[in-house]
Every structure is written in C-alpha cells, then in structure tokens.
C-alpha cells in the first residue's frame, strides 16, 4: 500500500498549518512505506495516510487510535528504530524513519491477546493478587506469562550512547510554557531588564492560539518577533521537567542540532509556570475506541496539519473549545451532530466493531451514526511544577478543575492553570507576572551577589521584595463532567476502567494513593496528566464524597519523561594516574584498577621484583597514597582527635604512625604523619581513604572545632611519591640528594627535606612498609618522572628495578603489616589489630574513644594473627574460612595470603576468634574446593625479620 | 529494660474480640470466576471500624513492620485487641517506597540467620496470607568491579556456603549469561570482574505484602486506623519533668482522633521514629536521611535478575510490568523531606549506563524518596525501652522491607512473652550504652 500526501484525509491548505507541503518526507509504518510533509508529526502523517489503529491497549489489547494526538496521547506510543516508547503525537517524521507499533503479537491487526477482552470481567484490577498462588511451584511460570504483558517498546541492547551534553545557565527568569500567558510574561520580564529563557514543550510558540483565528496567529507572530528583539532565549521542543530546591530547574531540550537530548540545568531566580491546560477525556462505554478523540486533537489535526479526522462526527461539547471544534469540522465539510452538555444533553456509549466507532448512543436513547466522536468536557491543570515547589492544588467545583493552593515566593504561575478570561486578560496577567518576576529576580540577584565574595562589592540596598498585586484572572463556570452513566476507561495506558475503580474502592482501597497502587491507575507514561482527575472523580463518586475531600496524588518529577542518556550526559568517570604513568606504560607495566587509580600491578614477575628489592634495591610509585598538607598552630589537636595515639609532642623532623577509628571504634584508616616545621605537617592516608579522610578531618574542623586554626590542603597528586626500598637504598638515594642520610642523623621514622636529582623541596622519610631499609620520597609532581628516571639511571650498578603493587603486597605480608579494609573490615575495632598500645584512652578525647574503651575490655572480638599452613605449598584463597575441626562453625578467615618468594612457602594473615589466637594453635581452613587443610597461628605478625633489623639499619 | 504487666490481662482476653462472624472469603481463581460471573465485588480488604477508647496493644505505623507485628500477635499469640494507627494510608512510608528486593546473603552469621528467616516467611507468604505477593525468585547479583570487592564477595560466599545459603561467586561470562544487558567487556571504567550470585534473592510486590498482613490481621480482629496521627504518648511516673522518660509507664496515646488508653505501645515507624520516641521520653541514636529511587517507562522485559553494584551505588531490577526500578545509597545529609533531587537522577543515569550502555534511550518516568532511620551501627533498635510498655522496632536504615516479616514475628513474641527473643537480642537499645554495637555495617552498606 502506498499513499500519496494528497490522500483522502489530507484537506486543502489551512491558514495556520505548520506543514511544508512542498517537502515530501518518506517513512515507513508497520513495514509499509508512506509519505508525509515536512512538519508532520508521526500522528498527523499516519492520520493523513488513513491509519486509524495505532496501538493495542496494555491488558486487553484493544485496538487504539489517537485520543489527544499530542505528546500526552496514551495510545500513540510507537517504536522508532532503536527508540522505544516514542510519542508519535509529538515526534516529527523524518526521511527514512522506521516506525513500528509496539507491544502487539503477532501483529497490530490481529493480536491474540485481544482474547483477554473476552474474559475481562474476571480480570478486574489487581486480579493477580488473588490468584496464581496454588500450586506454588507454578507461580514462576505464571509470572513469565504476566511479564509478557509488560507494555512498551523494545530496547536494542546495542544502542550506542549518542552525543549528549549538559548546559548550565543562571537566568533571572525561566518561563515554562510558550502560550499567550507565557510569551507575555517572558516579554514583560525581558523588557523590565531580566535575562529570560522561555521554554516551550511543542515545536512552535503560541499554545492553543495556533489553532485559533487569524487574529490569534497574528498575536503569536507579534510576540515571536518581540521576544526575539527583547533578547529572550526561546527553547522550542523543550520541557521544564523538574523544579528542585532553590529553583534548580531541569530543562530537557529535544531540539538541539547535535545532541539527541540535552539537559539544561538552570538556577532560575524566578520560575514562571505557564503550562496551560490539558484536556481531560470523558469516561463512558467505548471511550477508548479508535475514532473517539478530544477536541484539542481534532483542532490540531485540522488546523496545524490539514488532516480531516473523520467524515461524520458527533461532538459532545461543554465549553467554547468544543464549539470551536464544531466550527472547524463544519468548515472542512464534516457532518456534525452536536450534543451540548450545557443543555443537559449527554452521551452514554460509543458503539461499533473493535476498530472503529460507527454510532454514538445519546443519554436520551438516540443512536447517531458517525465515524468520529469528539468530546470537549473540561480540563486538567498540570500543576506538577507547583507540586514540586511544595504546592498542593485545591479543587474548585464551579470551574471543575484544580487550582494552585499556596503562594510560593520564587515560583509564579500564570495562564490557564490560574484562571480563564479573554485573550487580552490572559496576556495582561502574563505581563503583570513577567514584571513581578523581573522585580523579584532583581532582589534575588542582589541578595546572591551580596552573599558572595566578589572583587567589587555590591552597592546599594537590596531592592524591596515586590508584593504580589496582580489582578486575578476570572474563572469561567464549567459543568462537572467526569463520567457518564456507563463505565469506561479511566487510565488508557494502564487499561484501568471506572468499574475497576469502583471495585477497588468497595474492597477498601478507598484513598487516592491506595487505589492508585492497587489498580495502577495514573502510574503509566502520562503520569496522571490525563487520568488523575478522573480517577479522583470516580473514587469520589464511589465513596459518595466530594473531589476536594478525596484530594489528588502527589505529582512527582519529571514533568515529562527524560532519557537516561540526557540525564547522564557525557559520562565523566575520570581515572587518576601518577606523573610516572607514561614510564609505566612504556615499560609494559600490567595495570590494575585500584579505586580511582590505575597503577602498575607488576612489571612481568612480581616474585622477581620482591627478590630484587630484598637483595638490592627497588623503587615503587606510591603516588596514590593520600596526602594532606596540614598547617596551623592547632594541627596537633586535630591529629590527636583523629588518631588513637598521642601527637602533642611530635618533634619537628619526626614521623609517627597512627591508627584512625570511626566513632564506633572500627578501624577507618592508618598511615604516617610527619612534622615538617613548627606549624607544618604532612599526613598520609591509605590510597582508598584519601578522599574520605580529608572529609572526615574537615568534618571535625568545621562542625566540632571551628575554633581550631588548621588549614588542610589535599596534595595527593601534587606530590609524586616514590618508595626506594632495599639494602642498597641508602646508597642509591645518597647519590642524588643533598640530604644527610647518615643513619645517626637521619634515623628510622624521621623526615628531612632537600633536593633529589636536582629537584628542590623534596620530602624524604624513613619508614618500612616492605620491611626493608627504605626512603619514601615526595617530589613535586612536575618533576616526578624525572626523579624516577634519575633513580633508575643512577642505580643501574646497584641493580635497581621498579616493583609494582603486587610485590609490595607480598613484602608487607611477609612482614605481617595489615592493610586497612583487607585485613580489617567494617566490623574490626582497633584492639583486634594487635595495636592496643597505640590506643591512648588517657587522652581527653578522640574519635571512637568511648567505643574503644569497651572494645579494649571485649574478650570476644576477633584478633588479627599471622598464619602458616602446615603444607607450605598450599596458598589458601583470601576469604577462606577458618572453622572448628569437623564442623561448619566459623572461627575466622584468611584475610591475606601469598606465596612468599623470600621464605619459599605460603604466608597468611587472618582474623580468628580469641580462643584460637594463641601462637601455635592449630587451625582448620576450608579451601575453595571444599577440602580442609591444617595451619598454625604464628608467634609474630612478621613472617620475616620479626626484629625489624633490616628496616632500622 | 522495663516490661509490662498489661499483657497477662490481654492474653486472658484472647478471643474476646473475634472478627466478623462470617468468615471472610478466600482469594482464589475460583472466587474470581464466580464473582466475575455474578458481577459481584469483593468485601473490604480490611474493615473500616470506629476507633475504640481502649486496646491491649497500640502499634504506631501501618507499614510492613507494624502490620506484621499485629498479624503475628493475633495468629501466633492470640492477642487480637490491637489497633494499628497510621497518620496516612497503610503502606505510605518506607513500605511503599522501597525497591522491594529481598535476599539473605548477609555477612555475619547473625545477619544471615535473621534474613534467612525473613526470606522463608516471604517464600511462603502468598499461601500464608492468601494474597499473591508475587515473590519473584529471580536471583540477585552483586557485581564486583575491583579485586578488593571480589575479595569481599568471596568472603560473603564462603560464609553463606557454610550456612547452607545458596550463594556463590561467578565470573563475567556467567554474569553475561544471566544479564546480557550488562557490559562485561574489559573496556569500561568499572569492569565487571565477577559477581556474588544469590539465586534465592529476588523481588516482591511490596504493596501486596502490606495489604496481605493488614487483611490477615483484620480477619483475626485487629483494627487498622488510617489517617490517625499520634500526637503524644501518654506516660506516667517517668524521670522527666513531665513524668515521661526512663522509669515511666505507658498509659496510652493521644491521636488526632482522640485519646486511646493502652498498656503497650509499639513504635513501628520509619522516618519519624525519633519524633515518636521523644513523645515517650525515650532518646534514640537515630538520624534520618533520604533514600532516593526512580523508575523508567516500561519496555519489554530484558533484565531477568536483580543487579547491584556497590561501587556505582546503584541497584536495578525490572518489574513484570517492564519498568526498571532503580535505587541508590542514602543521601549524605539529614532531612525529613521526601522530594527527589536532580543530581540523583543524573548520577544514577550515568552509573546505570556504565553498567548497561544499551539502555540510553529508555526514559525516566518518576522519581521519589523515602526516609531511612540510620543508627550508628546500621542495625535496628528492637524490643523494650526504659519506659515500661513502650517498645520499638525502628532504625532499619535502608533495609527495613526485607526484614519486615521476621521483625513482626519477633516483636509479636516480644510483646506477648515480655521476653526479648534470641533472634533480636543483638538489637536491644542498651547496646549503645554498653558497647555492644552490631556489625552489619559491612554487609548493609553494600546496599541491596
């Protein structure tokens, strides 16, 4: 089937049409190639091609056609290529576009699940809670069947992450909605000197004026050019999706030339909410048949796209928009039968075969033949953005809709959501709102500037907060029309009918939140914009209450769904590398991901690296060590608070090891801190703890002791850290530095500053994580690579070789040093580490003191011990459990294990229950394959050089 | 801790207030058919009865914890003169805001025992409560992106294995088989090195759990009172200037609908646990933080298991309705606000696309927040307090839903026997003044 653009339903050019009839667009629908015009939405193009059935409903798979023919159409979801759930009433057609119906099987025309409709009376809302319980074994099968009813399109898992970007703006005023009120507000605000962004959900400015009279369109044209002249930034096809704390406004821009969707984050001084109104469907039998449309859909199709939606129409009208629809239909030659609700007339049913309407049953029993039924029975005020600002809307029975409930200082509303009135009145209200917004924005701007430290101070007093003296828009009386005497669909996307709601209310799900959860009404893609008020009205009817008594559900962000791609934007997940990384890469280091860092795990043979370091000298890049530069007279107080041991008397030139605990006494971090000068210290933390310890320290300073004079600068990447370890390290470092390395003057646990390889201001300290004589050098990072290469060059004859993280792990394990987070865990309190001598309970206070007081007395806490298997060739995997022989009772676990190149056997650290922690105790370890092996608790933590002669040398 | 003498009297009155004489109809396919044929509706899921002046037990909070406590008081102990009061509708708090994931692969033997019991109760719940709670035993996968995370997974798996919990560490190939949407290549910033796989874990329809317990309790005579806000707790003889606090004795509660006298009042709230306990003069070491969640539009089901990534602070599952449900870790600040934030959705989307790059065209439909009552050791406060007759089941942090059934069972036993059951012994309030903090932080902090 191929249809030309001049198909029978495309009518002559309309004065306000937005299509370009000179540009034909070729696309396909359901495998059939079709054409439309530039500017057509998928919906208007399909309608022009005579397509009436677009989708199948979720539960009963009833054929569905367009209801609103705009973004919110619950029946208009289609799959476009790899893009599921596309709003066909909104998305413009493009050449080559491949449009498919969703959720149909085997086809849109013949859908087998339509059989569900036959048993519909048994499948009341929530029926699944009442069945499929027996036999329990079969439930997984039932579940699989239920899951096939999941609505929606299909995700192509190979979808690429297309270009997305984000933009940050700080406008004075953001106006949400480009109808007459919104345009007027934006223009008035800009003319009053405000910087304004106007956001319009549709592809054109103008709102409902677009399908109005020539005069209406002249107003739109006037505003469009005035807005441009006034410098208002107009974002079309964009939606204000959310309003968060402090007017943090999210705008989803779908019209960016490069990004598929762009998230604009605006810190708006004032937000003006002017979304207009959303037309509400009417509940009656057959209201979801293809051929039943709302008046807005009909007017759009005729006036914007030149599409004739039917040839013989019944129009149920209760307002001027319904009347205008009648006029539009008659103008294009449609035979119209009017049912005027204001005169007490009504309809009770749309009849006909599954896929179309052929007649309408009137409340008076008459039957009128037609192929189009149009309803114009009232509006829903989309107050979502106001809800997000803290408002709870209030129902007005005279106007038959909800209105904003409270005034919010920095969120103003105008247009349809606050009232009706003639166009002049609406424009005037918008204008007053725009001026008020500009005034208030100026006051907010002044306040913001006065609060911020600036080169030039802000002059003058803060402008007065302009009171809201806007004249109110009138409210036009409107009959309350929600449901006819028959039952019909309330939530089209969830396939929930008024009968379901009555049933649910009778079952006790009789508050709006409960009925929503039980029936799923309002939970679908339109998020209540079409169905919330009808749900409330039906519930009120069922309970014999008023709509005001029932109230509404809370509208939550986003206002309109936004793709995960747009929210994610470009994904920034940086990795950190040291200044020596280029060398590591050139020298075939095997990388390992360690927290935020990529660093060398080894350079080919970790065991050889260990041996070389133990025999000669090795160097390792330890830049990821967290480093905090601490200055000020009160640094010792801070250190005493953070560490469990004492810090008030650390001499200049010394380094001390310390353990940090959280308030619950659990080991948080460890490391050494050096005193470089009278009021200058350098703290190191574990690599993974760098960020948290900085925050932890700042937290103490800022919330508990703001009176302490301490300034913290994180310098983790500012200093490149190199550990030179091994018996020949003194000789190697001595060749490059002016620091006196004589063991008498530069002892173990001391720090010196000086030049290394010609680089000034290097810090060197003597510590011994590897158990060897070692110097840890902290070098300004710009020279890190130079110092590294200089060490390798200067030490060729000494056998210097680099070593990686794995060799360091092996050496520290041989030496019995624990790693916080590996040998300790989220439950390990400090005394368990065997470091009780570092816990000074006689200090005034320190983090974790109270808990550690108890922990020191705790005789049940596990203890970190060194363990060796009886068979030295067995290396139990880390996390292997230690159990009571012959049982599954857990007594502890292996926390670290390696084959030791130095000792030629396996070595372990583990946590065990105190009654099996004594040296020599025999342990049973469960290996990964389930077999068990014997091991013994060792006397010292260190498997190697327990006296520490090497590192003190 | 102070216990109450009021229950002896309560137990003697067993059966005094039985439910309506006609037995409520059972839910079944046959029932659906006959009512469909006869076009009749079902009776109320719980009765709408007037608020009495006196009850044996008043439970504050109509979520899964409060309702389960009421249900087990009635079924296991015959105590039925019980009112559950809630300031909003049943299930309006954490019970209706969580992401409905259940599992039992915890780290400590105590944690495993507790949650395994909970999982057992969830497993048989549909039949026990005669409501299909749609327990979907779809498996639960916690991803490891670093070797240290993998080590922790191994630890959990080893502990679980020794306790007969089905839980093991699987490699990237098996991860891919279970969830083809995950990027298991070695390219990503957070490569998937493996996962802790727990086949018995899964999801459940959280609202159905709430309704099931409410219905079951109602059938046995318990009363549910919605929109009944507790304004004060009536205490006599306490150390405080107003007669409240330690040493005092509960006499009832003051609600927005009038005073109720009751010898036993149980605080089963979340988000407001401290405000309620303050009314009795009981201080709790709890701070309240929001936990955010979000859901996408539905698409055809493609994710058959629950996926959790601790490093990326995200957990995700796909409902039978086709929506992806996302959760994260608690926000790092205290508040009673339950509004979502923009930054949360941005970070969430970024992290989810790291895991599943193919879903960038899916649209976020709705976001929300719930309140989590955090204790210093991430473990709850359960049982007696220094005020006689005032009990707590609070401080559940981010994982109260999983623990709902077993908590209700144990709290009911606590109320009925006036003894702290062994399973909840570690969670007594005294631990904060005696240095016996519980250590589930390691496991709970990993998330869901």
Image (cartoon, helix red, strand yellow):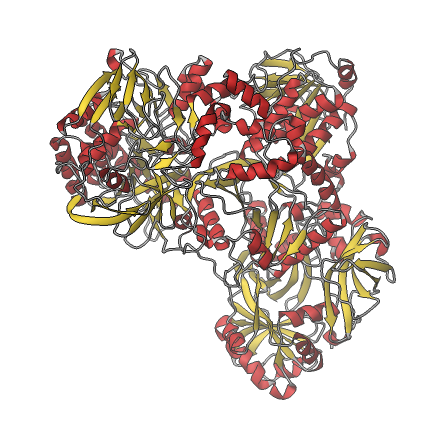
Q: Which quadrant is home to the C terminus of chain B? A: top right
Q: Residue extending furthest bottom?
A: A797
Q: Position of residue A481 (x, y in %)?
A: 32, 18
Is B204 situated left or right of B235 in this image?
left
Residue at image coords 80%, 47%: A858
The answer, for residue A892, to whether it is visible in the render is yes
Residue at (79% x, 17% y) in the render: B8
Residue B24 vs A519, above or below: the answer is above
* Residue A474 can be seen in this image: no
- In the rendered image, which quarter contains the N terminus of chain B? top right
Q: Position of residue A502 (x, y in %)?
A: 46, 18
**Quarter of the image holding residue A589?**
bottom right
- Rendering quarter of residue A873: bottom right
| Residue A303: % across, % down | 18, 34
**Taking B80 as reference, is A115 left or right?**
left
Nearer to us in this view, A12 or A83: A12
- The one nearer the camera, A597 or A661, is A597
Q: Position of residue A495 (x, y in %)?
A: 42, 29
Q: Is residue A540 left or right of residue A801?
A: left
The relative height of residue A467 versus residue A541 in the rendered view (above or below) is below
Q: Nearer the viewer, residue A446 or B137?
A: B137
């Amino acid at each position: 089937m191929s249809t030309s653009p001049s198909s029978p339903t495309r009518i002559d050019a309309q004065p306000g049409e937005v299509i370009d009839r000179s540009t034909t667009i070729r696309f396909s629908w359901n495998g059939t190639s079709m054409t439309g015009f530039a500017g057509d939405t998928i919906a208007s193009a399909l309608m022009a091609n005579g397509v009436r059935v677009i989708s199948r409903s979720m539960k009963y798979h009833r054929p569905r056609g367009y209801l609103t023919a705009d973004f919110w159409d619950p029946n208009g979801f289609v799959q476009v290529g790899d893009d599921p759930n596309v709003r066909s009433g909104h998305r413009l057609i493009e050449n080559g576009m491949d449009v498919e119906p969703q959720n149909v099987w085997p086809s849109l025309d013949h859908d087998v699940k339509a059989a569900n409709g036959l048993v519909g009376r048994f499948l009341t809302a929530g029926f699944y809670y009442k069945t499929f319980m027996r036999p329990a074994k079969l439930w997984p099968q039932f579940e699989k069947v239920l899951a096939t009813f999941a609505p929606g399109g299909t995700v192509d898992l190979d979808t690429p992450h297309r270009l997305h970007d984000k933009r940050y703006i700080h406008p004075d005023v953001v106006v949400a909605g480009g109808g007459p009120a919104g345009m007027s507000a934006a223009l008035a605000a800009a003319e009053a000197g405000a910087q304004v962004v106007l956001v319009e959900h549709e592809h054109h400015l103008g709102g409902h004026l677009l399908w109005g009279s020539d005069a209406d369109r002249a107003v739109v044209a006037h505003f469009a050019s005035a807005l441009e002249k006034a410098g208002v930034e107009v974002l079309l096809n964009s939606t204000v999706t959310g309003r968060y704390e402090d007017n943090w406004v999210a705008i989803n821009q779908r019209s960016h030339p490069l990004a598929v969707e762009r998230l604009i984050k605006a810190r708006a001084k004032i937000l003006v909410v002017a979304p207009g109104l959303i037309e509400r469907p009417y509940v009656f039998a057959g209201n979801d048949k293809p051929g039943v449309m709302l008046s807005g859909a009909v007017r759009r199709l005729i006036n914007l796209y030149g599409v004739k939606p039917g040839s013989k129409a019944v129009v149920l009208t209760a307002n001027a928009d319904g009347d205008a629809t009648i006029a539009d239909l008659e103008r294009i030659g449609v035979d119209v039968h009017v049912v005027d609700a204001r005169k007490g007339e009504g309809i009770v049913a749309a009849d006909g075969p599954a896929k179309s309407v052929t007649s309408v049953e009137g409340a008076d029993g008459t039957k009128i033949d037609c192929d189009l039924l149009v309803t114009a029975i009232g509006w829903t005020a989309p107050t979502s953005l106001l809800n997000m600002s803290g408002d709870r809307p209030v129902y007005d029975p005279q106007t038959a809709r909800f209105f904003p409930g409270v005034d919010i200082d920095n969120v103003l509303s105008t247009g349809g959501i606050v009232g009706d009135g003639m166009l002049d009145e609406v424009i005037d209200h918008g204008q007053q709102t725009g001026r008020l917004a500009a005034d208030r924005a100026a006051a907010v701007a002044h306040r913001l500037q006065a609060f911020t430290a600036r080169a030039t101070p802000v002059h003058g007093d803060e402008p007065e907060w302009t009171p809201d003296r806007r004249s109110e828009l009138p409210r036009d009386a409107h009959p309350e029309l929600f449901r006819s005497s028959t039952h019909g669909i309330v939530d089209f996307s969830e396939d929930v009918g008024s009968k379901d709601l009555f049933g649910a209310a009778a079952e006790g799900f009789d508050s709006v939140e409960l009925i929503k959860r039980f029936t799923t009404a309002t939970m679908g893609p339109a998020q209540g914009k079409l169905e919330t008020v009808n749900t409330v009205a039906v519930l009120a009817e069922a309970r014999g209450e008023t709509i005001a008594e029932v109230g509404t559900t809370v509208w939550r962000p986003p206002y309109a769904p936004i793709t995960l791609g747009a929210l994610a934007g470009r994904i920034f997940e940086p990795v950190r590398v040291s200044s020596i990384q280029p060398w590591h890469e050139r020298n075939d280091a095997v990388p390992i991901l360690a927290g935020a860092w990529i660093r060398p795990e080894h350079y080919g043979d970790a065991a050889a690296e260990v041996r070389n370091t133990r025999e000669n000298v090795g160097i390792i890049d330890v830049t990821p060590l967290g480093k905090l530069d601490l200055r000020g007279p009160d640094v010792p107080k801070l250190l005493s608070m953070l560490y469990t041991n004492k810090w008030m008397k650390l001499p200049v030139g010394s380094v001390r090891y310390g353990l940090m605990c959280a308030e619950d006494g659990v080991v948080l971090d460890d490391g050494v801190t050096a005193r470089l000068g009278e009021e200058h210290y350098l703290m190191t933390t574990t690599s993974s703890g760098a960020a948290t310890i900085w925050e932890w320290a700042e937290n103490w300073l800022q919330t508990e002791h703001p009176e302490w004079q301490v300034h913290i600068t994180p310098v983790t990447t500012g200093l490149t850290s190199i550990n030179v370890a091994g018996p020949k390290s003194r000789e190697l470092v001595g060749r490059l530095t002016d620091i006196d390395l004589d063991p008498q003057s530069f002892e173990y646990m001391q720090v010196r500053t000086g030049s290394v390889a010609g680089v000034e201001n290097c810090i060197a300290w003597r510590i011994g994580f590897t158990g060897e004589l070692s110097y840890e050098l902290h070098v300004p990072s710009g020279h890190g690579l130079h110092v590294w290469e200089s060490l390798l060059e200067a030490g060729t004859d000494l056998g210097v070789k680099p070593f990686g993280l794995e060799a360091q792990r092996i050496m520290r394990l041989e030496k019995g040093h624990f790693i916080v987070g590996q040998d300790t865990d989220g439950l390990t309190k400090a005394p368990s580490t065997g470091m009780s001598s570092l816990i000074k309970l006689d200090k005034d206070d320190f983090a974790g003191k109270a808990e550690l007081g108890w922990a020191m007395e705790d005789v049940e806490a596990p203890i970190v011990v060194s363990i060796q298997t009886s068979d030295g060739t067995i290396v139990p995997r880390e996390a292997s459990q230690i159990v009571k022989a012959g049982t599954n009772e857990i007594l502890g676990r292996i926390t670290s294990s390696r084959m030791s190149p130095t000792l030629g056997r396996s070595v372990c650290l583990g946590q065990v229950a105190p009654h099996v922690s004594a040296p020599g105790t025999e342990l049973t370890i469960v290996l990964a394959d389930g077999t068990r092996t014997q091991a013994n608790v060792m006397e010292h933590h260190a498997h190697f050089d327990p006296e520490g002669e090497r590192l003190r040398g | 801790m102070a216990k109450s003498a009021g229950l002896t009297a309560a137990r003697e009155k067993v059966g005094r207030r039985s439910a309506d004489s006609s037995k409520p109809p059972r839910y079944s396919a046959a029932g659906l058919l006959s009512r469909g044929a006869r076009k009749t509706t079902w009776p109320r899921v719980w009765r709408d009865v007037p608020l009495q002046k006196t009850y044996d037990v008043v439970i504050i909070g109509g979520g899964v914890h409060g309702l389960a406590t009421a249900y087990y008081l009635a079924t296991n102990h015959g105590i039925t003169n019980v009112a559950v009061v809630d300031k909003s509708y049943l299930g309006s708090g954490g019970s209706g805001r969580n992401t409905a994931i259940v599992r039992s692969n915890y780290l400590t033997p105590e944690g495993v025992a507790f949650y395994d019991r909970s999982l057992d109760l969830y497993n048989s719940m549909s039949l026990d409560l005669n409501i299909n709670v749609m327990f979907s035993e779809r498996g639960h996968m916690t991803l490891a992106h670093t070797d240290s995370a993998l080590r922790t997974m191994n630890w959990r798996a080893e502990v679980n294995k020794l306790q007969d919990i089905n839980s093991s560490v699987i490699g990237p190939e098996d991860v891919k088989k279970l969830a083809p949407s995950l990027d298991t290549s070695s390219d990503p910033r957070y490569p998937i090195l493996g996962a802790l796989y727990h086949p018995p874990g899964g999801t459940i329809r959280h609202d159905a759990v709430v309704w099931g317990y409410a219905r079951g309790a109602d059938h046995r005579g318990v009363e549910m009172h919605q929109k009944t806000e507790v304004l004060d707790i009536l205490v006599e003889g306490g150390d405080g200037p107003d007669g409240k606090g330690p040493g005092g004795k509960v006499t009832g509660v003051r609600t927005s609908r009038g005073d109720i006298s009751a010898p036993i009042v149980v605080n089963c709230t979340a988000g407001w646990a401290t405000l309620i306990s303050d009314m009795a003069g009981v201080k709790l070491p709890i701070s309240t933080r929001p936990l955010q969640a979000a859901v996408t539009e539905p698409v055809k089901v493609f994710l058959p298991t629950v996926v959790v990534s601790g490093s990326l602070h995200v957990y995700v599952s796909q409902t039978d309705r086709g929506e992806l449900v996302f959760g994260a870790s608690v926000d790092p600040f205290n508040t009673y606000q339950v509004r979502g934030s923009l930054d949360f959705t941005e970070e969430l989307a970024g992290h989810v696309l790291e895991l599943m790059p193919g879903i960038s065209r899916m649209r976020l439909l709705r976001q929300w927040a719930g309140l989590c009552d955090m204790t210093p050791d991430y473990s709850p406060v359960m049982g007696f307090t220094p005020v006689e007759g005032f009990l707590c089941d609070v401080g559940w942090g981010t994982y109260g839903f999983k623990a709902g059934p077993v908590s209700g069972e144990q709290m009911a036993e606590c109320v009925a026997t006036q003894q702290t059951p062994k399973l909840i012994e570690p969670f007594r309030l005294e631990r904060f003044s005696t240095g016996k903090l519980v250590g589930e932080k390691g496991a709970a902090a990993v998330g869901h």
